[in-house]
Amino acid sequence: MLAETNVKTLDKVVVRFSGDSGDGMQLVGNIFTNVSAGMGNQVSTFPDYPAEIRAPQGSLGGVSGFQVSVGTNVHTPGDKCDVLVAMNPAALKQNVKHVKAGGVIIVDIDSFKEADLKKALFETDDPFKELGVNAQVLDVPVTSMTKAALADSGLDNKSIIKCRNFFALGLVCWLFDRPMSGVQHFLNKKFAKKPAILDANTKVLNAGYDYGHNIHASVSTYRVESNEACPGVYTDINGNTATAWGLIMASEKSGRPLFLGSYPITPATDILHELAKRKDLGVKAVQMEDEIAGVCSAIGASFAGNLAVTSTSGPGLALKSEGIGLAVIAELPLVVIDVQRGGPSTGLPTKTEQTDLMQALYGRNGESPVAVVAPASPTDCFTMAFEASRIAIEHMTPVILLTDAFIGNGSSAWRIPDADEYPEIKPPYVPADKIAEGAWRPYDRNEENLVRYWAIPGTEGAMHRLGGLEKDYKTGAISTDPANHERMVQTRREKIARIANDIPGLEVIGPDDADVLLLGWGGTYGHLRTAASELCKQGKKVAFTHFRYINPLPANTADVLSRYKKVIVAELNTGMFADYLQSRFPEVKMARINKIQGQPFLVEEVMDAVTKIMEEK
């Protein structure tokens, strides 16, 4: 008799795919995510790449993971998973700690031979007992079933083995009642030019689905709730792609052509890749020979009237610092994207941190203030890339956009916005009357916000020069006068400060009578908001706010912080933002939650830390 399937109905579930770097875990994870988003689920993903380009097959260092949470009210990829797919013993060993008690582990039992166990440094022939696994284990002969499905395909053994990931995907789709038509759509798109591979993967996908259906696997299956979605076109989008698209929207709304000058660096390279595809939208994306050339080409493009962008990660931001200083003193619009990773130096190139904050704020010679903003989620990368571009153009300044590897590589379900949902960007062109009067000079300013006017080369009567030497406040000629230099330094500083009048205030989520405020910045938003919400459900009154504008801070920051007896700052560094806030608001009592492990927060660890701080006398 077939075993009766136990169906669990949950508001959200977490699945983690894991295997060797070449096992296609990122691909099937992305397809599962896209299909779930298309069903109306909210999604949040966490691709966990190894740092090694290709570690030895079956080794612990070569394990690649992809975790996704799907359902309702999803803000994080989840602390632990309901279902783990482990394609080999190393994947099991590295990821078993992420499985919920009583969850489901699907293993390719064909890959659990003695040699495989030795590669993963197991000491016994029973890895499940050795690891103390407390889960429902489903031993599936993935490799042999894949070979059986493709016995008549004409493919060689290596090509057949590469299809194993789709057997696992088919089985997971059965567990979660995902429609095969949705998966087939992505297969057709991915392998449109490789019909033999498309046919093979389709057969294996259906074989995996049928395997679960036919054996009625004696493990839990899941029905996942969906939100009522706002009408529109939805897609699953990662942060780097959203950043690129936000820049394109800003180019459309400003009427200025988009130029990207960049050098490839993990984890920011996908922004360059995405913009290089968009020649049809007038985008000019140039791969430069190094980081310095990347920023300098963008500065030249900015002088020529482009929305100029350069993208990098922490080491590249260090190399670009002198160029950014040039854009500061020339007062040219420039967007610098830093997708933060673990450091210092090469550090942890595929892992996430928030350790470039002080470099973004202060990492240049001289008094060199720039605006700094940080998106809160993969989809917010679109909005904040647009905002960085708007601020750069309308305030004639470099803007550093601090994303990170977690949200840059991670993805969420996103409704593609209509163009009229974003405002027009208004470049501060030189007023025609000033040119007509012959009275315009390169550093003439709008006295309200201190923004200097932008004279696009070719504008009749507006010929001028800019450069890295200090200029006279009135004439724009080179000046070494001490008083003039101090005036220009103070003016550039005040110009950045006045951006606070042009950005939204902080919003606080949670009980009005809370004494404790949990806050963060950038890509930690989902974990911190979820932690605050769960603490409130436990009866602990914790309010939450999140910073997307770092320099200048929102105008109501002092008012918000002063309402609470205790402010807790949580960030993926040793306390940079807390130090920054404390220097601005020394009267505010601040506690800190810090993590520097190359991994995002877990909701549980934030909740535990907040509870401990609240209990301190």
Image (cartoon, rainbow, N blue to C red):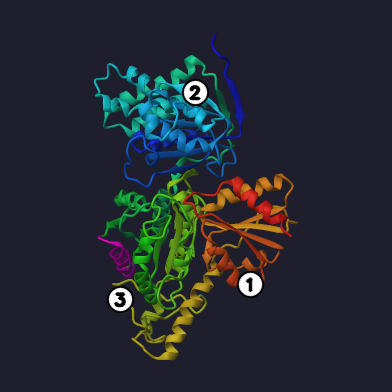
**Image quadrant containing the C terminus:** bottom right
Task: Decide which of tag 3 and tag 1 comes sooner along the chain.
Answer: 3
**Image quadrant containing the N terminus:** top right
C-alpha separation, residue under disc 3 versus residue under disc 2 = 74 Å
Q: Which residue is mark 1?
A: 586
Where in the figure is residue 530, as x and y percent of width and height? 61, 47
Indicate which label's residue lies in the foreground, 1 or 2: 2
Task: Decide which of tag 3 and tag 2 comes sooner along the chain.
Answer: 2
Q: Which residue is mark 2?
A: 138
Image point (45%, 90%), residue name: 483
Residue 297's place in the image compared with 78, above or below, is below
Where in the figure is residue 3, as x and y percent of width and height? 56, 14
C-alpha separation, residue under disc 1 versus residue under disc 2 = 56 Å
Where in the figure is residue 120, as x and y percent of width and height? 40, 35
- Whether pointer 1 and pointer 2 mark residues with C-beta atoms closer than 8 Å, the reply is no
Number of residues whose C-alpha sits closer than 10 Å to that of mark 1, classed few (under 14), some (14–19) or many (20 or more): few
Q: Which residue is mark 3?
A: 460
Considering the numbered disc 1 on the image, is that residue within a helix, a strand or a loop?
Answer: loop
C-alpha separation, residue under disc 3 versus residue under disc 1 = 51 Å
Number of residues whose C-alpha sits closer than 10 Å to that of mark 2, classed few (under 14), some (14–19) or many (20 or more): some
Residue 259's place in the image compared with 31, above or below, is below
- The magenta-colored residue range is 289-304
